[in-house]
Image (cartoon, grey):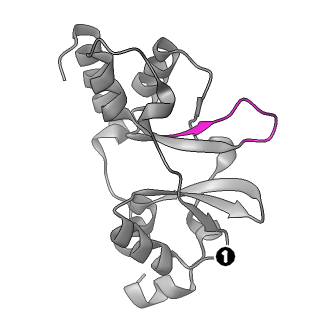
């Protein structure tokens, strides 16, 4: 696909459905969150409120969380959360890409009306242009290294 075609592709066509998104609940303790981070290997995780309908309360940057674990400060998940960026399911991925660049963000929450239906990342959009991008995460190596380093407190 070329860059021009990005104007016509919608977020809903590229997003990861919310049912497949790894999330953190706002009520989780730091040990539970750490287990999720190690298991999934993602650098950003949506944080949801403890409600029947998923309500995104923020985005957790996992590196900041791990850095906080090394300090003696009291754990406060809300102090680490970034404001979520929401996009409409019908928004063009070119417009989303421009907003990602302008706001220096890498993830958006996709909504249809008021309902959260998925997420879209910078990587998702770039893969539409250049094809599949190989991550170290794809083979599980990063998860293994993170697990070892976190266990020994070496980052």
Q: Residue at x 36, y 28 (%)?
A: 65
Q: Position of residue 39 (x, y in %)?
A: 45, 24
- Classify the position of the C terminus by image quarter: top left
* Residue range highlighted in magenta: 45-54
Q: Which residue is mark 1?
A: 90
Residue 66 location, quadrant: top left
Q: Depth check: 137 or 98 in front? A: 98
> Number of marks in the image?
1
10 Å neighbourhood of mark 1: few (<14), some, or many (≥20)? Answer: some
Q: Position of residue 139 (x, y in %)?
A: 34, 36
Quarter of the image where one finds residue 99: bottom left
Say whether residue 6 is left or right of residue 41: right
Residue at the image point whose x is 67% and y is 69% from the top? 89
Q: Residue 147 appears at what percent x and percent y?
A: 32, 18
Is residue 133 found left or right of 48 in the rendered image? Answer: left
Q: Is residue 44 magenta?
A: no
For mark 1, give the secondary structure: loop
Q: Main secondary structure of the magenta part?
A: loop
Magenta span contains residue 46: yes
Figure quadrant of the N terminus: bottom left
């Amino acid at each position: 696909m070329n860059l021009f075609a990005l104007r016509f592709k919608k977020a809903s066509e590229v997003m990861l459905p919310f049912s497949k998104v790894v999330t953190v609940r706002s009520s989780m303790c730091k040990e539970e969150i750490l287990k999720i981070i190690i298991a999934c290997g993602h650098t950003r995780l949506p944080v949801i409120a403890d409600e029947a309908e998923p309500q995104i309360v923020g985005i957790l940057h996992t590196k900041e969380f791990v850095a906080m674990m090394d300090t003696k400060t009291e754990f406060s998940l809300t102090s680490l959360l970034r404001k979520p960026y929401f996009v409409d399911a019908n928004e063009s991925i070119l417009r989303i890409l421009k907003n990602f660049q302008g706001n220096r963000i890498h993830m958006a929450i996709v909504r249809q009306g008021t309902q959260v239906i998925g997420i879209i990342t910078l990587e998702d959009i770039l893969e539409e242009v250049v094809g599949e991008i190989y991550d170290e995460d794809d083979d599980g190596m990063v998860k293994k290294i993170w697990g070892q380093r976190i266990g020994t407190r070496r980052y």
